[in-house]
Image (tube, rainbow, N blue to C red):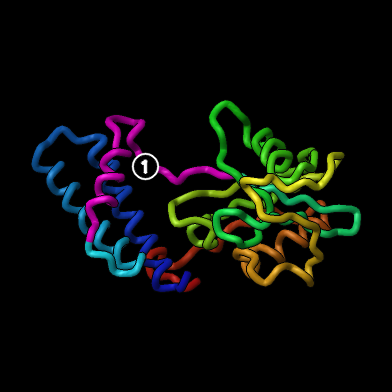
Amino acid sequence: MGAAEADLRRWAEALAATAMTGLAFTENGYERERYEEILSIAADIKAVAAGGSTDTAPIITEWMREAKLGPAGYVTPKVAVGAIVANERGELLLIQRSDSGQWLYPTGWADVGYSAPEVVIKEVREETGIEVEIVRLIGVLDGMRLGLSKIPLYSLVFLCRPVGGTLMPHPLETLDAGWFSRDALPMDTIGSQRWAADIFAAIDDPSYPVFYDDVRRPVWRGNE
């Protein structure tokens, strides 16, 4: 995803979130019209980012379907988890995702009813067959900024220790899985230029501080 496309997607989602949150809390008909107009503008921006499609109706319909009244309608980023699993040689466990063919550490949505560490353990087991235990939280990343997602999400990244199991990629969720050294990551690994240095530093040093995205100044036109 190019920088211009990423900016357009972020602006579109931010505008849409503002409009959907406004729709959740207003009972004023005039204000609702204005928020719906903002949704239309946001849909135009998102369509341009996707390649210039002129049919924005499906985008607007989806956003309106997601809009809810009251606090439940306050739009926030979704939450996902990422698992950093290193073996005794310091190699990182990566999966080749079936949805894109690209490589990444095991990830998954934060399922309701599970704590974040519980989801991590479940996702690693399901995607790779490896059993792990949680060591600690090492990072918090913006999924859109990282290029992991086309929708707003925060990824909570946990360092894990393998404690059993056999490497067995999930036949539906993954195309392949394996252990990779820091100097031999697959070329189509998602966002490694942003996270690899921090992740391998955390693998090497248990006291390495939690990492997160730099603050852009100003936020909307800041340099990456």
Q: Look at the picture and state if 120 lies above or below 138.
A: above
- Residue 18, image x, y percentages: 29, 48
Q: Which residue is drawn at 67% across and 46% down?
A: 171
Q: Residue at x 73, y 48 (%)?
A: 169
Task: Residue lying at the far right in this picture: please name it.
Answer: 88
- Residue 126, image x, y percentages: 69, 39
Residue 20 visible in the displayed image: yes
- Residue 6, image x, y percentages: 43, 66
Residue 31 picture quarter: top left
| Apparent side of residue 51 relative to residue 25 in the rendered image (left or right) | right
Residue 157 visible in the displayed image: no
| Magenta span contains residue 142 | no
Front-most of residues 178 and 46? 178
| Apparent side of residue 193 relative to residue 65 in the rendered image (left or right) | right
Q: Residues within 10 Å of mark 1 (few under 14, many from 20)?
A: many
| Apparent side of residue 58 relative to residue 200 in the rendered image (left or right) | left
- Residue 133, image x, y percentages: 79, 38
Element at label 1: loop
Q: Which residue is drawn at 29% across and 41% down?
A: 21
Q: Look at the picture and state if 220 lies above or below 67.
A: below
| Magenta span contains residue 58 | yes
Q: Residue at x 28, y 63 (%)?
A: 45
Magenta segment boundaries in residue numbering: 55-80
Task: Residue lying at the far front in this picture: please name it.
Answer: 171
Front-most of residues 213 and 185? 185
| Amino acid type, callout 1 | Val
Residue that mark 1 sits on = 75
